[in-house]
Image (cartoon, rainbow, N blue to C red):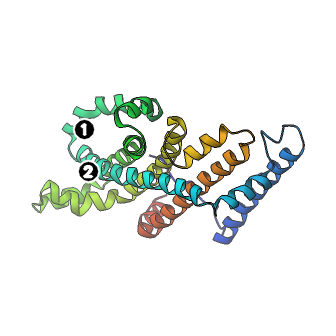
Amino acid sequence: MAHEPTPPRGLPRPGVWARGAAGVAVLFLASELLGRAGIVDRSFLPPASSITARALELAGDTEFLFNVRVTLTAWALGLLIACAVAIPLGLLFGSVPAVNTAVRAIVEFLRPIPSVALIPLAALVLGSGLEMEVPLIVYASSWPILFNTVYGLDDVDPTAKETLRSFGFSRFQVLLRVSLPSAAPFIATGVRLAASIALILAVGTEILSGFGDGLGMFIAQAGNVPDGTTDVLAGTVWAGCLGLVIDTVLGRGEDRLFRWHKAQRSGAS
């Protein structure tokens, strides 16, 4: 389970945004200077201003936006199915120790297998497009949701569970009334981690598969064109911006929904 980085104490939100903007400005200037210094040929490393201009230009390109929509569709479908599969399995594994013990070896065997290694097999069996992308995204993004759900159940206050049991509540009722609400912040963090993994898989699968549509396919095709480096980097900027927007939206939603959990953790520490 990953923990959120602790924000600087006493720094208001505008200050946090100002620091982030300063970091982006430094990176932009460094890239601009390096690109214009002539150390590396511009066809391999264009200045940051050229990349940014091309990225903005792509915002008005309908074909490029279609590719972005294809990637986001695969991302959303894969993440949705991963949640539908991994959360119930995590609740089952975390609630029934016998099941957790029985499947532990299988889980530990499957988890280290990199999703990209499955791309050739998936392409042969499932074809191209969403039929291939979505299963790979589900496979890769299910793990953080599954394990965070199990860890969340382990963190439930045992006294609260025992209290309900002593009043005659069944295991399922204890799960719904105590365990699931208590584990919900951990599950949300797992979904947030999985969202980033799903986007990486969506773009990466499109690049490595070599066919179909999507943002990754745009980047791969641009890489095969002479002087296509600017398009490659502009597409990469788009992928990074999508990841930043997704993480920000999910992070804000997580903070609003589970503010009580954050306050509880701060009080405990």
Indicate left or right for 50 with 16 as reference: right
Residue visible at 30% across and 51% down?
87
Q: Secondary structure at mark 1?
A: helix
Q: In the image, residue 96 lies at what x, y percent?
A: 20, 44
Nearer the observer, 98 or 214: 214
Marks 1 and 2, how far apart at CA: 13 Å
Circle 2 sits on which residue? 88
Nearer the observer, 56 or 128: 128
Characterize the local packing of mark 1: few (<14), some (14-19) or many (20 or more) Cα atoms within 10 angstroms. Answer: some
Question: Which of the 4 quarters of the picture holds residue 174?
Answer: bottom left
Question: Which of the 4 quarters of the picture holds residue 258?
Answer: bottom left
Q: In the image, residue 187 lies at what x, y percent?
A: 37, 54
Q: In the image, residue 166 lies at what x, y percent?
A: 13, 59
Which disc number belongs to residue 171?
none
Circle 1 sits on which residue? 100
Nearer the observer, 114 or 253: 114
**Type of amino acid at the residue the image marks with label 2:** Pro
Counting residues from the start of the chain, the first of labels 1 and 2 encountered is: 2
Quick check: marks 1 and 2 in contact, CB under 8 Å?
A: no
Question: Which of the 4 quarters of the picture holds residue 12?
Answer: bottom right
Q: In the image, residue 232 lies at what x, y percent?
A: 67, 45
Which of discs 1 and 2 lies nearer the camera? The answer is: 2
Nearer the observer, 163 or 154: 154
**Type of amino acid at the residue the image marks with label 1:** Asn
Residue visible at 75% across and 41% down?
227
Look at the image and tell me whether residue 155 can be seen.
no
